[in-house]
Amino acid sequence: MKRLFSTVDGLLRGEYTSPEQLREGRVGVDLRLLIGAGLVLGATYGVFMGLYAALRPANSSLAQLLATTAKVPLLFLATLAVTLPSLYVFSALAGSRLRFVETLRLLLVGIVVDMALLASFGPVTGFFTLSTESYPFMIVLNVVCFTVGGLAGLIVIYRALGVVVGGEEKQREPIPDDSSFRVPPPSKARGIFLAWAMIYGAVGAQMGWILRPFIGAPDLPFTLFRERQSNFFEAFFATLRQLFT
Amino acid sequence: MLQPVDALLRCEGRHRIGGMDIPWGQLLVMIGAGGFVYGIVMGSYAGRPLQALYSGIKVPLFLGVSTMICLPSFYVICALLGLRSDFSAAFRGILAAQATLTLCLASLAPITEVIYLSIDHYQLATLINGLQFALATIGGQWTLARHYYPLIQANPRHRLAKSTWLVVYIFVAIQMAWVLRPFIGAPSLTPSFFREDALSNAYVVVTQTILEVLGLPAR
């Protein structure tokens, strides 16, 4: 567990995605550790998220808490499985130095960063769970937390792509000491990233919709999955309307 | 006894800018004592010792728990921005700012008490306390800015980390204040640690109140 946390700490500090390593076409972190960290961090946020169902006065559901704890890491790993092939193919076409396993590692790095941020928001979600009964508010709060975490993960991938998809001229440029923060991603990398980020975001949102319920509506009994209906975006805007009217 | 207080306010001695150690003991005592003093005065509006005691406990609790809830996300954000090595210095600044805030509150307590003695209007008492907290917050921000100045000079990304801290902290603190109310204690209600409807949501209530005022349909 200690090794897991030191890996997460290293990931947050960009130790495994330094421009030097990326230019050599490697992401120097163990795949099993990345998956382990993703599972632990995702499950941590899942506990806080599922607390709403476990603590609600009517229809309290411990089963929902357990299901959400499992579903949050599952959501990310399933989204990764769906979107990895497209990122690999298009980044390879654009001349990325990363092979398939390294691309997988890079995406997992982004996901672990996302989940680390999400898990760190856990106490905030837990606090609002304990102090509010408003179901629409909890939905909006969780969507905001997931969005912020997702953006952080995407930024990590974006910076890395800026290095690995760099052309020969970029390769010769001196590398700044303080990580890839100031390396301007070439337009090719930017284009791939934007397209892939949109796909990743849309697939992630819809995957979340397929795997729902996560929070557990107070007036509905526990089910592992809900029936297929509507889509994430339509439901989210309906919730916003519900919250403010 | 006033020496640590003076050192904190002037950023000298153990509280100097850029110091290596966090003077935990002094800062926690100042947060606890300063918050307790203002809380006692804040809760004394209706002249009920029990409400004053509750508020004395709740003011430091409010600041301390809000900080603890926001700390994990602040750590991760610092690490993500490449500021992990400065986290200790940033956290030192945050603690110093919280201590300054409570000292400012404690220094404003006599003014609040005098105003209490001269008014008989609960809403006005609420407004006065809101102003006192706003003033004390400015004091706290002053200290935070002084601690952050060398950090931002060394790395401008600290500005973003500080802004993110403030956004998350304010978001949590508003709800925390709502949950922990009453702090003043309406004279028509019996003294209590929590209100009966403590577990509601400040943001939802405020939004619905605004909609009602605007004559728009609310749930």
Image (cartoon, coloured by chain):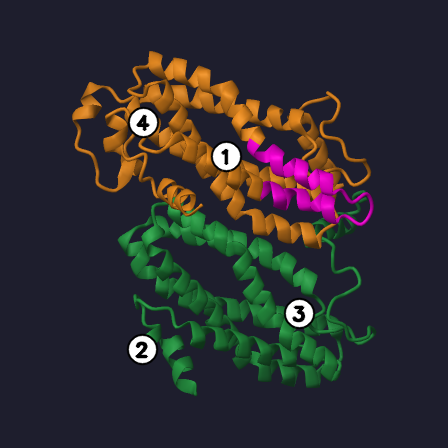
Q: Residue at x 62, y 46 (%)?
A: A48
Q: Provide the residue designation for mark 3.
A: B127
Same subunit under labels 3 and 4?
no
Q: Which chain has been coloured green in this picture?
A: B
Query: Quadrant where the N terminus of chain B lies?
Result: bottom left
- Specify the chain shown as orange: A
Q: Residues within 10 Å of mark 2 (few under 14, many from 20)?
A: few
**Category of crowding for the residue at label 4, using alpha-carbon neighbours closer than 10 angstroms: few (below 14), some (14–19), many (at least 20):** many
Q: Residue furthest bottom?
A: B1
Q: Quadrant of residue B43?
A: bottom right
What separation in Å lies between label 2 and label 1 (alpha carbons)?
43 Å
In this view of the protein, can residue B86 be seen by the observer? yes
Disc 2 + disc 1, Cβ < 8 Å: no
Splitting the image into 4 quarters, where does residue B49 fall? bottom right
Q: Residue at x 43, y 47 (%)?
A: B77
Q: Nearer the viewer, residue A91 or A61?
A: A61
- What residue sits 27% from the left and 24% below the top? A25
Q: Earlier in the sequence, mark 4 or mark 1?
A: 1
Q: Nearer the viewer, residue A35 or A159?
A: A35
Image quadrant holding the C terminus of chain B, namely top right
Find the distance from the CA under tag 2 to the CA under tag 4.
Answer: 46 Å
Instruction: Determine whether label 2 and label 4 are within 8 Å by CB.
Output: no
Q: Which residue is mark 1?
A: A150
Q: Are there few (<14), some (14-19), or many (20+) residues within 10 Å of tag 1?
A: many
Element type at mark 1: helix
Task: Describe the element under mark 3 as helix, strand or loop.
Answer: helix
Disc ID at residue A162: 4
Dot 1 amino acid type: Gly
Which region is colored magenta?
Answer: A45-73
Disc 2: which residue: B13
